[in-house]
Image: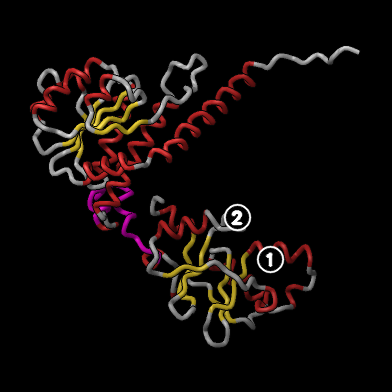
Amino acid sequence: MGKPETSAPTARERAMEAARRLLRLESEAVRALEARVDDTFARAVETVAGCRGRVLTSGVGKSGLVAQRLAATLTSTGTPAVFIHPVEALHGDLGIVSREDVAILVSKSGETDELGAIIPTLKLLGLPILGILSNERSPLAGSCDLVLAIGRPEEGCPFDLVPTSSSAAAQAMGDALAMAALEMKGLKREDFAFFHPGGAIGRNALVKVGDVMRSGEALPLVPEETPMREALRVILQMGLGLVVVRDGAGQLAGILTDGDFKRLILRDPDFLQRTVGETMSRTPRTIGADAWLTEAVRRMEENPGGAITSLVVVDGSGRPEGVIHLHDCLKKGL
């Protein structure tokens, strides 16, 4: 018997495989950078963190777009930066450069004529020149004081030409440099909010759970001896999809959700004859009122048993004082 015939992949199947291949190559290119966080990288971080002027980023084409994004990321995290297009720099934009600045040049080939043309002026002014480059043996690499090499990853383009993996790696290296500089400079959450006064990032950077949680009369709190029928009424009335249960000493005893009711309907026909204390979950996820709202969202999304939509807010002694719901976080733009 001959081998069974197999049909050729459709255009749709080929497109999906191309997408998977690109994502695989880009993730491998970024993952490989971890080994390049070495002494050279540390010196680059010290150079950026210690910059008393501005960080000037530059590049051409897709590398230029990476350089633009790097300038924006640095500026938003406490390191003033500006992108200079190398062509415009040759026609007057270098006038903004001061001797206290630092230059970061981004290039895949390391042979970009426009970047090479601005290096003499940068050196004349005594600027430290950092390079985020694929080609460590290029003319541009030889002109840099420090080279953050990203290697030569295989591009996602079927012809290995269009910068995809290399652009992802260059962007990741720039992000790593910016975040490491942020850490070295000791930027605080309050500082971060200051740099984003008009956007959701700034508005939410300083928001704490206690600022948003449902508390007081808005907290669906019942004692353990509450009948299930009454608990269901509270759930429907309060609109949070749960009741928080306290014991006789006022401590958090557990939680009962509308999902619990649905499961009980299937396995226990007499559940309405029971009390909340007999049916509640005794291991609710909790958080403190002083925690950042972003931390609350992270805990809900990364809950070990699967994502959840609420956390019980407890004080230092374990007493329930509120509930934070994912919907309330979403209203804040998180």
Q: In this view, does 100 lie to the left or right of 11?
A: left
User: Is residue 98 a member of the stretch shown in magenta?
Assistant: no
Q: Name the residue under label 1.
A: 261
Q: Is residue 10 visible?
A: yes
Amino acid identity at mark 1: Phe
Between 137 and 26, the one lying in front of the other is 137
Q: Is residue 217 visible?
A: no
Give the distance between the C-alpha atoms of the residues marked 1 and 2, in whole angstroms.
Answer: 18 Å
Give the residue furthest to the top.
2
Q: In this view, does 88 lie above or below 216?
A: above
N-terminal label among 1 and 2: 1
* Residue count near mark 1 (Cα–Cα under 10 Å), binned few <14, some 14–19, many ≥20: some
Between 40 and 310, the one lying in front of the other is 40
Residue 290 point in image, percent of width and height: 37, 68
Between 170 and 221, the one lying in front of the other is 170
Name which residue lies at 59% across and 58% down.
Answer: 304
Image-quadrant location for residue 123: top left
What color scheme is it? secondary structure
Residue 25 point in image, percent of width and height: 51, 28
Which residues fall within the magenta stretch? 191-209
Q: Is residue 84 left or right of residue 214?
A: left
Marker disc for residue 306: 2
Between 93 and 165, the one lying in front of the other is 165
User: Is residue 206 a member of the stretch shown in magenta?
Assistant: yes
Amino acid identity at mark 2: Gly
Q: Which of marks 1 and 2 is in front?
A: 2
* Residue count near mark 2 (Cα–Cα under 10 Å), binned few <14, some 14–19, many ≥20: few
Name which residue lies at 62% across and 73% down.
Answer: 282
Regarding mark 1 in the picture, which secondary structure is present there? helix
